Image (cartoon, rainbow, N blue to C red):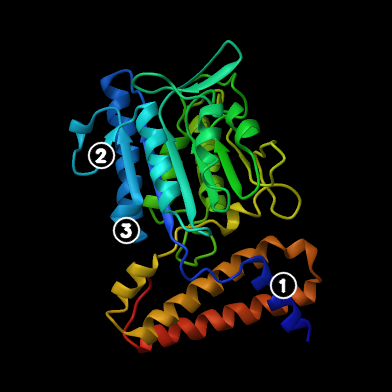
Amino acid sequence: MRILTALLLVLSLCPPRANAQPHLLIVSGLGGDHLHRERFHGWAAAMFDAATSRFGIPDSNVIYLAESVERDPERIHGRSTKENIESALSAMSAKARPDDKILILLIGHGSYQGDESKFSLPGPDMTPQDFAAALAGFPTQHVALVNTASASGDFVGVLSGDRRTIVTATRSPFERNETVFGQYFVEAFSENVADVDHDERVSMLEAFEYARREVERFYEGENRLQTEHAVLDDNGDGEGSSEPDPATSDGRLAATFSFDASASFVAEVAGGDPELAELYRRQRLLQDSLAVLRTRRDEMEQTTYETTLEQLLLDLSRVALEIRERGGGGP
């Protein structure tokens, strides 16, 4: 009975979302010089490719806006102007279903002047308040906004809210030096380096933790004072955590936000086999339940947690075996 109760708790915290789809907006802002334009585009392109290839997000659900469309017209959909960003988010909100996942990745420079933080763009820059107005179009979706720019800390307090994961490369607007957090955050998705629980997915929490550790190693390796300290907020209190702990502070919601294979991609991978597609669906739901269970560890009796964890892992193993027996792989 305790096992059933625990499983129902996990499933209630992470209900089935068979039709949920991920959406991604990548914004590469004003580079300022050739070196930074190339660097920012490299990070953005790597994220674009990881989303569409590694995670199977449909091209129609991925938008990449950059300083210059001519730099890579096959990937870039338009210039990263304030108007185009707001238009892209408006179109995305009209398209997104109630339970869909929305990731907004900002790559570039930031500034802080006159008590106001800004993300640097060709033309008018955008403030946290500008993004807050645009995000109002996603009242039920889980939104993750990641600002990898300098002086980005103020974005947390303004954008924090229910069903939102906000990540900034700096803990305050006064950390104004160039940041490297974006490189490692993208690397968490584009390389097989951040999947610590080996479930073949990368959550926002895993990506944040990986990037935070790599930033520390970067400054240590360069023998430099660390001038950026990333934070994550996902409990709606407007306070970012540099070391989120799902059991006591931030990180619980971020642990459940990951890029799953879309329904259309699963159908394609299943090769028209409805039973195989159903197995993939069950696998995703079990993976979601496992992610939520791990965030609730300190709230459950140890025996109940361990027994439930074992049951979920056994169920995942059985589903994986059935997928292999039907000739499938991992979506």
Q: Earlier in the sequence, mark 1 or mark 3?
A: 1
Residue that numbered label 3 is attached to: 58
Residue that protrudes farthest toward the right in the picture:
301
Question: What crowding class fits label 1: few (fewer than 14 Cα within 10 Å), some (14-19), or many (20 or more)?
Answer: some
Residue type highlighted by circle 1 = Leu
Residue at disc 2, secondary structure = loop
Mark number displayed over residue 9:
1
Classify residue 97 as left or right of residue 271: right
Residue at disc 3, secondary structure = loop
Classify residue 188 as left or right of residue 16: left
Rounded to the nearest whole Å, what is the CA distance between mark 3 and mark 2?
15 Å
> How many numbered marks appear?
3
In the image, residue 150 sits, relative to residue 19, either above or below, namely above
Residue at disc 1, secondary structure = helix
Q: Earlier in the sequence, mark 1 or mark 2?
A: 1
Rounded to the nearest whole Å, what is the CA distance between mark 1 and mark 2?
43 Å
Q: Position of residue 312 (x, y in %)?
A: 61, 78
Q: Position of residue 249 (x, y in %)?
A: 73, 47
Q: Residue at x 32, y 45 (%)?
A: 46
Residue type highlighted by circle 3 = Pro
Classify residue 84 as left or right of residue 260: left
In the image, residue 173 sits, relative to residue 258, either above or below, namely above
In the image, residue 47 sits, relative to residue 278, either above or below, namely above
Label 2 near label 3: C-beta < 8 Å? no
